[in-house]
Amino acid sequence: MKLLVVEDHALVREGMVLTLRRLDRRVEVLEASTAAEAFVLIERHGDLDLILLDLLLPDANGLSLLHTVRGQSPMLPVIVVSALDDAGTIKRYIQAGANGFVPKSSTSDVLLDAVRAVLAGGLFVPEGSDAAGARGAEPGAPGEAKDLDLTIAQRRVFNLLVMGLSNREIGQSLGLTEGTVKIHVSKILRVLGVTSRSQAVIVAARRGLKL
């Protein structure tokens, strides 16, 4: 797992990095203190799984920064982490394409819950917020997996992939070799226009696909 923290305050950034390393001993956390540094890292690391993004950076402001990230990497999940946490702000950024919003007043456990939820393809907003309904399914996106250019076998693999099973577990469940599962997963990613399993899960959630 590879995550990127974009935060200009060193103490806050270091605290977030330490918290994120609790997710898994193999997690790799990259750091950027400016938008410019972030975009260099996004270009350099095409296998990023998630960005945690502060809104008030010295070289960019909130919405423009999020729009730029979305334009550069439309399928890459983004969690906004900000001290600006009123209901209107949260709703505005969810509508702009953020997959989650975590107030800086939150505990480290809340941050980890947000990351887990978003990596699983969900949407995370603070408890009690009405922003969860701010963004529906993508316009014009198919609501059924059968509408995608996938075979029945590939749709079955897709279903188990979304549930979080590994290639080996999918193969055991469906009676397929791990090599065959890898071929199916590659086709699924290609059809969805993404490069990682986590991004495929996010697309399924955003489109409201019935698998």
Image: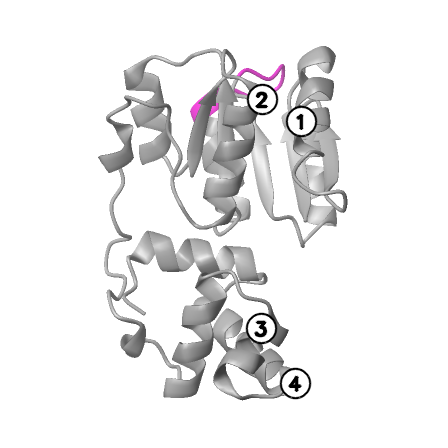
Does residue 187 show up magenta in the picture? no
Residue at position x 68%, y 49% from top?
A: 1
Mark closest to the chain's N terminus, 1 or 2 = 1
Q: CA distance from mark 4 to mark 3?
A: 12 Å
* Amino acid identity at mark 3: Glu
Q: CA distance from mark 4 to mark 2?
A: 39 Å
Residue 15, placed above or below residue 65: above
> What is the number of the mark on residue 169?
3
Q: How many C-alpha atoms fall within 10 Å of the one at disc 4: few (<14), some, or many (≥20)?
A: few
Name the spot of residue 67 as percent of width and height, x first. Answer: 45, 36
> What is the number of the mark on residue 19?
1
Which residue carries the number 2 mark? 108
Residue 79, placed above or below residue 89: below
Mark closest to the chain's N terminus, 2 or 3 = 2
Would you say residue 105 is visible in this rendering? yes
Label pair 2/3, CB-CB below 8 angstroms: no
* Amino acid identity at mark 2: Ser
Label pair 1/2, CB-CB below 8 angstroms: yes
Mark closest to the chain's N terminus, 4 or 2 = 2
Which secondary structure lies at badge 2? Answer: helix
* Amino acid identity at mark 1: Thr
Residue at position x 54%, y 15% from top?
A: 56
* Stretch of the chain drawn in magenta: 56-63
Name the spot of residue 113 as percent of width and height, x first. Answer: 50, 33
